[in-house]
Image (tube, grey):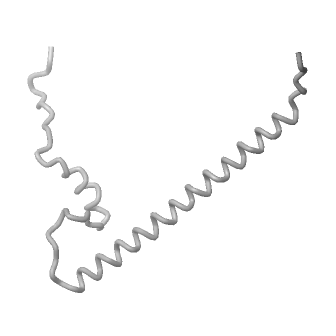
Amino acid sequence: MADENKPAPQSPMDPFEMYRRLWGNLGVPLPGMAMPTFDPQEVEKRINDLKSVEAWLNMNLNMVKFSIQGLEVQRAALQAMRAGTEPPKKDQ
């Protein structure tokens, strides 16, 4: 039997609330999620913040690319070693 004292899980009223909670703690506003500001200093601050995030993401993207490239070189080396150790195939 189901526990009658237990409240039923509630569905969120706002589908973007999860993202607001996730990103709100980081201090990075999601584009289009807040009212636009008419303060030029606030706009400049947001631009600089987003440029910092962009630089961080580009750095991480480059690290991922280098990891992929390193694994591809490793795969090629393993294939070359396997090909060198296999006995030659006999023609039938």
Where is residue 2 drawn, in percent x and y?
Answer: 14, 18
- In the image: residue 73, left or right of residue 50: right
Q: Residue sitting at 77 percent across and 44 percent down?
A: 77
Where is residue 57 drawn, in percent x and y?
Answer: 45, 63
Q: Quadrant of residue 82?
A: top right
Where is residue 50 drawn, in percent x and y?
Answer: 35, 71
Quadrant location, the C terminus:
top right
Q: Along the line of sight, which residue is nearer the eye, 42 or 10? A: 42
Q: Along the line of sight, which residue is nearer the eye, 6 or 10? A: 10
Q: Along the line of sight, which residue is nearer the eye, 24 or 50? A: 50
Q: Residue sitting at 22 percent across and 86 percent down?
A: 40
Q: Along the line of sight, which residue is nearer the eye, 72 or 15? A: 72
Q: Quadrant of residue 35?
A: bottom left
Q: Residue sitting at 14 percent across and 38 percent down?
A: 11
Quadrant location, the N terminus:
top left
Position of 26 relative to 81 (above/below): below
